Image (spheres, rainbow, N blue to C red):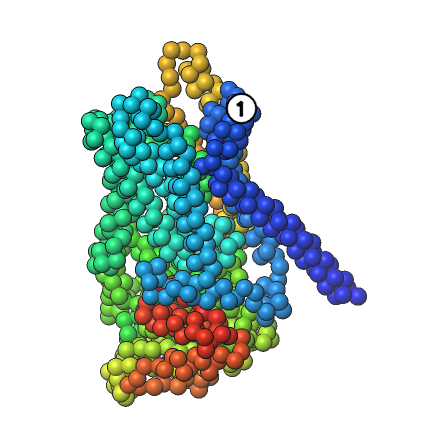
């Protein structure tokens, strides 16, 4: 009876959580649609002549400037409300056990993920991505056409003559202004895809790693519009003999010089994103991108804070995320051990707190100060937080200068006793979508195998420890030479329970493309390194603890409320008296600076308080993990045993083919008759080939997903 009572109580609790989640979901959709309606109506005369004046009249007070208050209410508050409520929604979702595995067998809207554009300049684009892209372009076109129509309707020979201009010059002025207004819409979305810890991305089923391409799209459109905006104004000033306007920085209104500084820094970032420059001069691209700070500050100074309500939400959430990442990066993470593979590949095993959990296909950013204090590089996580609760692993392939230096440090005969490492992350999908399918086909090239290791380890745990009927797994991997086959040894962890895949239906088809027969004589053995503990090192933990989403929602909500309170006090007792009781006019630039400073102070205060509050629990878990990993620097016999003896279950599931590439079309179509999800990870050409096969008419039951893996 007691057991039944517990089960009923647990089921009742889950039902209540599901009910609250459904209500929150409905509210989020309503707020989002309402915000979208305001964006659509913004360029219309109805909005400008009726809605906006009415809102400004109701908000007109001594505490808020009417224009800024209206834009905060229309554009900023709804998005931040969605972000904060989304955090609570995701927090409740974590309480629902087993990711609702029973309902995952019937994937909904899976056909929308099928690629429709593969080899174009946009990369691999699915149906749902194309649909949203078309809707976004439609919003930009609608906004541009409506603004232009309204502005041009007011221009005639008489009105132009009053300004001392010709009609075409007045229209050029209006077109230049419209390009800037439309560019602001793109800028309002620019930082959402790169806000790694944001709640908005998981709400839409996205991850920061796979959303980078949206940031690229938005960046290109933004800079195209802003560049055209600047060029049109330069031409307008030249033909009207007003080139002196380029140096204008008025006390009120638009500051042209600030806009030109923003444009120059934006162009510098834009030019370094050209693929050829980015690949050959990555460090130039990396460091130049820090100009985004100057770009955003001068964008705000250009138009004034009153007109920044549209772009403020994505900047606000980005600053929150960036500051939390900064706090996490100040900690040194305990590096437990490493495996050095003969194919110039490393596996790093770092200690983690027991409360830190994540789903497969995650990434984290690594910094090694002894190589570079500024460079952070993303790497795919290969461990499973359930199979390996005390550690987190990544695989690093020696590809660029940074990774080559790291490999040389660890592969040298004189091994290091300690390596100082800092981490940001981990960042992983909010759910285990791969459980929805009966068969998983994973296609990789070279180091592209690394994201799939975490999935296989998770399935090993579920099938062995939870007796869950895991999907059948087919791993098709291509390597250049025999030495890279040692990467298959990374599929099973160096330690942990269980340490085999006997209960998992795993089939590995490995292809060595540049060798016709195995060359094992020249392959060096795998080198295992155990690092000594250090008092300054801590196990990796979430900066906000296990209840990360709950704390993040509280930070967003409380910091914005405090921001509004302080802004109202400053306006009432400092800005308002100067504007209304003296002959002076408060500077638009100084008002913008005050707003930005107050915003940053509120974020720093609330985020620091939340981190400090969680530090005690993290310290307790730190001592627990340090006691579990021990204090000796010698590898255990169990670790050595795993290094020196092959895993029988893994070797039996592996077929190695020499001297040829995999016939992907034939192999993939073999699994077209069942519910199959096909992952592709590796070189761009490989992912495009797999996407082409899955989007063909012969592969109706194959659901494709491209993995943006990192190493």
- What element does badge 1 sit on? helix
Depth check: give the residue in front, 122 or 595: 122
Residue 296 place in picture, x, y as percent: 34, 39
Residue at 49%, 50% (x, y): give it: 200
Which residue, as the protein is rendered here, is positioned at the far bottom? Answer: 517
For the question of whether residue 229 can be seen, the reply is yes
Residue at 50%, 57% (x, y): give it: 205
Residue 364 place in picture, x, y as percent: 40, 58
Task: Please state if 409 lies on the left or on the right of 181 as rendered.
Answer: left
Residue 438 place in picture, x, y as percent: 54, 76
Against 581, is 554 above or below?
below
Residue at 59%, 56% (x, y): give it: 93
Q: Which residue is mark 1?
A: 57
Against 120, is 33 above or below?
above
Against 407, is 149 above or below?
above
Task: Please state if 182 lies on the left or on the right of 545 as rendered.
Answer: left
Against 253, is 97 above or below?
below
Depth check: give the residue in front, 298 or 511: 298
Q: Quadrant of residue 253?
A: top left
**Where is the N terminus found, in terms of image quarters?**
bottom right
Depth check: give the residue in front, 310 or 480: 310
Q: Residues within 10 Å of mark 1 (few under 14, many from 20)?
A: few
Residue 118 place in picture, x, y as percent: 37, 66
């Amino acid at each position: 009876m007691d057991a039944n009572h517990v089960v009923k109580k647990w089921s009742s609790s889950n039902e209540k959580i599901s009910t609250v989640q459904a209500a929150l979901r409905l509210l989020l959709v309503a707020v989002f649609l309402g915000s979208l309606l305001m964006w659509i109506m913004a360029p219309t005369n109805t909005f400008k002549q009726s809605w906006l004046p009415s809102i400004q009249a109701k908000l007109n007070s001594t505490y808020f400037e009417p224009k800024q208050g209206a834009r905060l209410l229309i554009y900023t508050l709804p998005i931040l409300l969605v972000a904060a409520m989304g955090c609570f929604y995701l927090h409740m979702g974590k309480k629902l056990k087993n990711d609702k595995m029973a309902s995952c067998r019937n994937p909904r809207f899976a056909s929308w993920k099928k690629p429709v554009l593969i080899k174009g300049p946009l990369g691999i684009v699915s149906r749902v991505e194309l649909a949203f892209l078309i809707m976004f372009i439609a919003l930009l076109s609608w906004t541009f056409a409506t603004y232009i129509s309204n502005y041009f309707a007011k221009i005639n020979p008489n009105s132009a003559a009053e300004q001392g201009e010709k009609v075409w010059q007045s229209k050029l002025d209006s077109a230049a202004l419209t390009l800037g207004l439309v560019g602001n819409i793109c800028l309002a979305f620019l930082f959402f895809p790169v806000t790694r810890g944001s709640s908005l991305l998981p709400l839409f089923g996205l991850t920061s790693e796979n959303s980078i391409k949206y940031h690229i799209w938005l960046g290109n459109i933004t800079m195209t519009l802003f560049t055209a905006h600047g060029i049109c104004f330069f031409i307008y000033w030249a033909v009207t003999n007003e080139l002196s306007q380029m140096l204008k920085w008025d006390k009120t209104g638009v500051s042209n010089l600030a806009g030109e500084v923003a444009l120059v820094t934006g162009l510098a970032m834009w030019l370094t994103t050209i693929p050829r420059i980015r690949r050959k001069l990555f460090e130039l691209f990396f460091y130049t991108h820090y100009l985004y700070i100057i770009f955003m500050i001068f964008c705000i100074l250009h138009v004034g804070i009153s007109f920044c309500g549209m772009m403020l939400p994505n900047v606000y959430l980005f600053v929150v995320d960036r500051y939390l990442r900064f706090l996490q990066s100040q900690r040194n993470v305990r590096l437990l051990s490493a495996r050095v593979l003969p194919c110039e590949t490393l596996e790093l095993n770092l200690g983690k707190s027991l409360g830190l959990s994540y789903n497969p296909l995650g990434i984290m950013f690594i910094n090694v100060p002894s190589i570079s204090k500024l460079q952070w590089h993303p790497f795919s996580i290969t461990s499973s937080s359930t199979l390996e609760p005390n550690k987190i692993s990544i695989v690093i392939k020696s590809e660029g200068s940074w990774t080559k230096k790291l490999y040389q440090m660890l592969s040298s005969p004189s091994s290091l006793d300690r390596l100082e490492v800092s981490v940001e992350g981990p960042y992983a999908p909010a759910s285990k979508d791969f459980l929805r399918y009966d068969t998983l086909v994973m296609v990789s090239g070279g180091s592209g195998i690394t994201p799939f290791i975490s999935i296989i380890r998770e399935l090993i745990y579920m099938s062995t420890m939870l007796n869950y009927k895991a999907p059948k797994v087919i791993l098709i991997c291509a390597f250049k030479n025999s030495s890279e086959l040692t990467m298959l040894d990374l599929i099973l962890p160096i330690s942990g329970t269980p340490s085999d895949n006997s209960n998992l239906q795993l089939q590995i088809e490995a292809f060595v493309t540049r060798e016709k027969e195995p060359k094992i004589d020249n392959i060096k053995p795998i080198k295992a390194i155990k690092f000594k503990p250090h008092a300054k090192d801590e196990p990796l933990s979430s900066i906000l603890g296990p209840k990360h989403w709950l704390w993040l929602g509280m930070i967003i909500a409380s910091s914005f409320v405090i921001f509004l309170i302080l802004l109202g006090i400053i306006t009432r007792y400092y800005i308002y008296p100067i504007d209304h009781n003296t002959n002076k006019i408060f500077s638009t630039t100084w008002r913008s600076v005050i707003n930005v400073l107050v915003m940053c102070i509120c974020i720093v205060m609330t985020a620091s308080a939340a981190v400090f509050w969680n530090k005690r629990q993290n310290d307790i878990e730190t001592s627990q993990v340090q006691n579990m990993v021990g204090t000796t620097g010698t590898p255990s016999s169990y670790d050595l045993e795993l290094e020196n003896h092959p895993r029988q279950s893994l070797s039996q599931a592996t077929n190695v083919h020499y001297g040829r590439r995999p016939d992907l079309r034939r192999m993939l179509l073999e699994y077209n008759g069942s519910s199959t999800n096909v992952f592709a990870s590796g070189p761009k050409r490989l992912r495009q080939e797999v996407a082409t096969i899955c989007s063909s008419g012969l592969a109706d039951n194959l659901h494709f997903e491209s993995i943006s893996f990192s190493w």
